[in-house]
Image (cartoon, grey):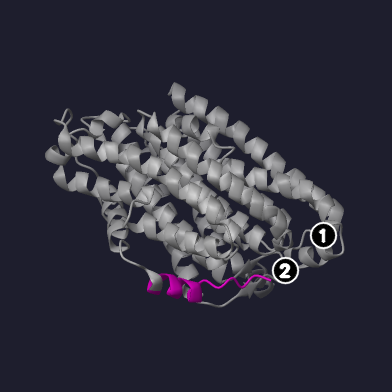
Amino acid sequence: MIVDALTVFLPLLPEAFLTLCALFALGAGVFSRVDLRKTNADMLVRIGFGGAFVLLCLTGRETFFSEDGLFVSDGYSRFVRIAICALGALSLSFGQGWLKYKKYARFEYPVLLAFSVAGAGTALCAENFLPLFLGLEAAQLPLCFLASYKRQGERSTEAGAKYVLISLLSSGFILFGISALYACLGTLDFSMTGKAAAQADTAALLPSLAFIAAGFMIKAGAAPFHSWAASVYEGMPSPVTAYAAVVWRLAVWAVFAKVVFYPLAFAEAFWSPVFLVSAVFGVYAGAFGALTQTNVKRLSAYTLTVSNGFILLALQIGEPAPFLFFVLIDAVLAAGLFAVVLSLRIGGDLSEDIGTFAGQGRAKPVRAALYALIFLGMTGFPPFAGFWRRFFLFESAVKNGDLAPCTLMMAGSFVLAYAYLKIIRRMYSAQPKDDLSSVPLSLKAALWGAAGVSLLLSVPVSPVFEAAERALLFTGG
């Protein structure tokens, strides 16, 4: 009996371990002594993240299927789950430092974060639209609570209410699209979808595909469904914003890519124009939106709108390896960007004013240099990491005959680069107005790591990309 149960849950063993630790952490937070609640919960969740990471790494390149065929752990899902687990642990560290700094420390934060990461991993392993949808909901529901974690803050409460509405809208779109797809094809299994679609009227499937695409793009904050992101990201507690923008966003795009590359690959004629138009629009909407921002979290939201545009271009190319290569570098640089946001500490408070950067090149030369490297990498300014990841996308897209969209996107990305170059110029030309406080070790590690990636990948990375292409073969189906 136990062996059969393990066979069923083998693909989800890391997520099961993380969930079990989160449940024990929840119990420890409720029943432990008041002074030990947070310590015990933090320790158990850290054990959960560490154990899940080890289990994912130990499986190597083996592919595991559940007995009922609903889940599979393959090279694609394992790679993304490792990244999500590592970035989730980093987000936990961000959050713990911020909660201690702001005196909002409660045991619920790590527990909710662990449940969200486990839900994302479940969705990535799904081989059926139903567990995929349930996994996404299990990942996003804790985030709705985390958005309002600062319960007595008006901005956080407003952001939480908005995010709940956005979550319901996007989930409704996806669920309606899945329902329509089932009505047309009679199956929800990924392995059967393509075969059933070959015998169905493709035109009848277009509404379901449109709703599924809209739902995922709303969740990720991609244009033209990006207008909610700036206000919600601004109102969320800063570490929650970092988690939503880095880990959750990575999970949404990875799950959507799995759907596009595998069960719905028959609809390439539909995906291609939708992704191209949305990609071009997203780059310009994000770039021009960033020009007028004075709040660093809103600036980050519009920056990610631009990045989402390039992710859509990676999806349009239709190859898993370039997509994963792009989104991984994007996630690392985005983590660095939000480490910058969380490191703008003045005395006993966090600053969100872009004017805080003024003069930091003189006051904090090392930290300012790290900021500049992250900004240049995130905007795709040559020759840093962002430039080369986009170079590979443009190279593949141009081979597919998409020269005009690539030219437009390249021009739009320079508008975003201009917005960040203004900040860098102020860092080194203006007089410092504020003295930034020291930051925890986790933030320092994130700043140095993201800046290092931006600098080290400032040379052609063909060998790295080729190695990723060999290692990240999509084995679904």
At x 38%, y 29%, the residue is 293
Of the image marks 1 and 2, the number of the one nearer the N terminus: 2
Q: Which mark is residue 187?
A: 1
What residue did someone put label 2 on? 69
Picture coordinates of residue 324, whole percent (x, y): 50, 62
- Image quadrant where one finds the C terminus: bottom right
Along the horizontal axis of the image, is 288 left or right of 96? right
Give the label, 1 or 2, closer to the camera.
1
Picture coordinates of residue 358, whole percent (x, y): 21, 32
Q: What residue type is disc 1 on?
A: Thr
At x 39%, y 32%, the residue is 291
Q: What residue type is disc 2 on?
A: Gly
Quarter occupied by residue 464: bottom left
Along the horizontal axis of the image, is 56 left or right of 454? right
What count of labels does the image hold?
2
Report crowding for label 1: few under 14, some 14 to 19, many 20 or more residues within 10 A (C-alpha).
some
- Please tell me whether mark 2 sits on a helix, a strand or a loop: loop
At x 39%, y 40%, the residue is 415
Picture coordinates of residue 198, whole percent (x, y): 83, 65
Magenta run includes residue 293 = no
Q: Is residue 10 above or below residue 149?
A: below
Magenta residues, start to end: 463-477
